């Protein structure tokens, strides 16, 4: 969607009334204030860290001569591998997704996320989902605990919670989880290039400026080689595939926006990340993207990204409607994005007090491909 076309935006057409089954979160503030404070994690964290970087003090950049000075320039630059480790920011997450292939020809999709929030207390949440792409059956699990259930590592992390493990030490990553009678065990290699996301007009790699909502560090490892096995119905199934890894942290308030996010592997070997943020009225907050090839990464301007919404799917459980099909126009061509399975909503009321759509997608058009899509904040569209 071109930036000049985004006023009240196409999201306004997809607003919904709150159902009797899902009350506005503000109705729970008085009796559950302490719980809301510590559950401020992931996509709907409420609390912000006591440490606010100088760059977030003002939403408008200062000007030196004729050139504005980026707020992101006041922050330390991205520093890897040290920045793989947890930070003292208001919120942070580590995230993996992928489509895994078995030797039988069967295919399985998964995502795993670890959220850490620094509010009144530090709080850690884990989310995991596995989809059998042959049957469409989806399994999911979530876990929450106070504190940081992680072993200390110099330049990585080792989260262990309720029998789950998400860890990284150098190039070696590990994901282990058992949930709903299934299990996921993957060993991943992070030897591929790191993509430090930035706005097209920014000189600061690894940082995105969300305006009044704050600033986020953000980098990806788009193609991590994964080997391991899943277990479904008592059967152990060896699997392998390319896995997308994201790490994002900062002092930013995601209650002020929702997003459409795409992580795509194209058959020509390129990788595409698109990030389309909107407020509760459907107005555009930020459109950003990165195209990565073996030669390097190129940030996309908002005017170079055109997103056209297509078919919607409405959750029978929450009654939230999500735009699950998209047409995407980029400088490299036009692409059609469609889900493998419509029913990919993650109901996280137990841990992060929100819902979101997260699932594998097919890419067709100027190039074939596959990837993942995340749709967040849809239940708050049009609500005050």
Image (cartoon, grey):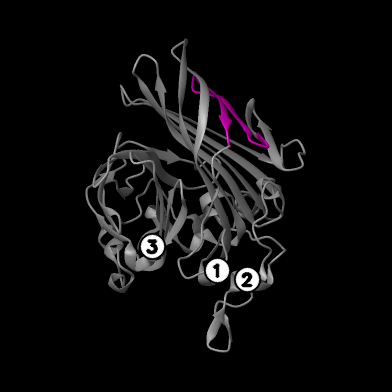
Residue 384 falls inside the magenta stretch: no
Query: Are the residues at dot 1 and dot 2 in contact (C-beta closer than 8 Å)?
Result: yes
**5 above or below 134?**
below
- The residue that disc 3 covers is 383
Q: Which quadrant is home to the N terminus?
A: bottom left
Residue 222 % position (x, y): 48, 43
Point out which mark residue 203 bears.
Answer: 1
User: Which of pointers 1 and 2 indicates the residue nearer the eye?
Assistant: 1
Would residue 15 appear left or right of 116 to someone viewing this image? left
Q: Give me the C-alpha separation between circle 3 and circle 2.
A: 35 Å
Residue 143 % position (x, y): 59, 35
Q: Name the residue located 55 percent from the left edge and 47 percent from the top edge.
A: 194
Q: Name the residue located 38 percent from the left edge and 38 percent from the top edge.
A: 359
**328 above or below 76?**
above
Q: What element carries label 2?
A: helix
Residue 178 falls inside the magenta stretch: yes
**350 above or below 278?**
above
Q: What element carries label 3?
A: loop
Q: What residue occupies the far bottom of the structure in this picture?
A: 65
Q: What residue occupies the far front of the structure in this picture?
A: 295
Residue 54 % position (x, y): 68, 72
Q: Give me the C-alpha separation between circle 1 and circle 2.
A: 8 Å
Residue range of the region highlighted in magenta in the rendering: 168-190
The image quadrant that residue 265 belongs to is: top left
The image quadrant that residue 317 belongs to is: top left
User: Which of pointers 3 and 2 indicates the residue nearer the eye?
Assistant: 2
Q: Residues within 10 Å of mark 2 (few under 14, many from 20)?
A: some
In depth, the one of 22 and 146 nearer the eye is 146
**111 above or below 334?**
above
Q: What element carries label 1?
A: loop
Point out which mark residue 73 bears.
Answer: 2
């Amino acid at each position: 969607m071109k930036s000049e076309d985004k006023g009240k935006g196409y999201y306004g057409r997809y607003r919904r009334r709150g159902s009797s089954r899902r009350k506005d979160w503000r109705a729970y503030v008085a009796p559950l204030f302490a719980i809301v404070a510590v559950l401020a994690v992931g996509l709907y964290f409420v609390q912000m860290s006591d440490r606010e970087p100088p760059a977030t003090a003002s939403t408008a950049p200062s000007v030196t001569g004729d050139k504005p000075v980026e707020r992101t320039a006041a922050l330390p630059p991205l520093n890897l591998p040290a920045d793989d480790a947890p930070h003292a920011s208001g919120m942070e997450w580590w995230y993996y997704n992928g489509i895994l292939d078995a030797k039988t020809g069967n295919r399985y999709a998964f995502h795993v996320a670890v959220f850490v929030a620094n509010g009144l207390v530090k709080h850690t949440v884990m989310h995991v989902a596995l989809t059998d792409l042959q049957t469409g059956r989806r399994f999911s699990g979530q876990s929450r605990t106070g504190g940081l259930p992680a072993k200390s590592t110099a330049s990585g992390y080792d989260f262990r919670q309720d029998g789950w493990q998400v860890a990284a030490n150098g190039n070696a990553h590990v994901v282990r989880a058992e949930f709903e009678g299934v299990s996921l065990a993957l060993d991943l290699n992070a030897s591929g290039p790191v993509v430090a996301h930035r706005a097209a007009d920014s000189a600061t790699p690894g940082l995105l400026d969300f305006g009044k909502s704050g600033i986020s560090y953000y980098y990806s490892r788009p193609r991590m080689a994964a080997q391991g096995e899943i277990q479904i119905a008592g059967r152990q199934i060896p699997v392998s595939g390319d896995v997308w890894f994201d790490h994002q942290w900062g002092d930013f308030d995601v209650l002020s926006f929702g997003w459409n996010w795409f992580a795509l592997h194209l058959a020509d070997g390129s990788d595409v990340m698109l990030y389309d943020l909107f407020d509760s009225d459907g107005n555009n907050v930020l459109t950003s993207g990165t195209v990565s090839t073996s030669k390097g990464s190129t940030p996309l301007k908002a005017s170079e990204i055109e997103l056209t919404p297509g078919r919607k799917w409405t959750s029978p459980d929450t009654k939230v409607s999500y735009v699950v099909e998209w047409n995407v126009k980029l400088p490299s061509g036009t692409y059609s994005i469609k889900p493998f399975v419509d029913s990919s909503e993650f109901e996280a009321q137990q841990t992060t007090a929100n819902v979101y759509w997260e699932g594998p997608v097919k890419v067709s058009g100027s190039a074939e491909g596959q990837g993942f899509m995340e749709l967040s904040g849809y239940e708050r569209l049009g609500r005050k």
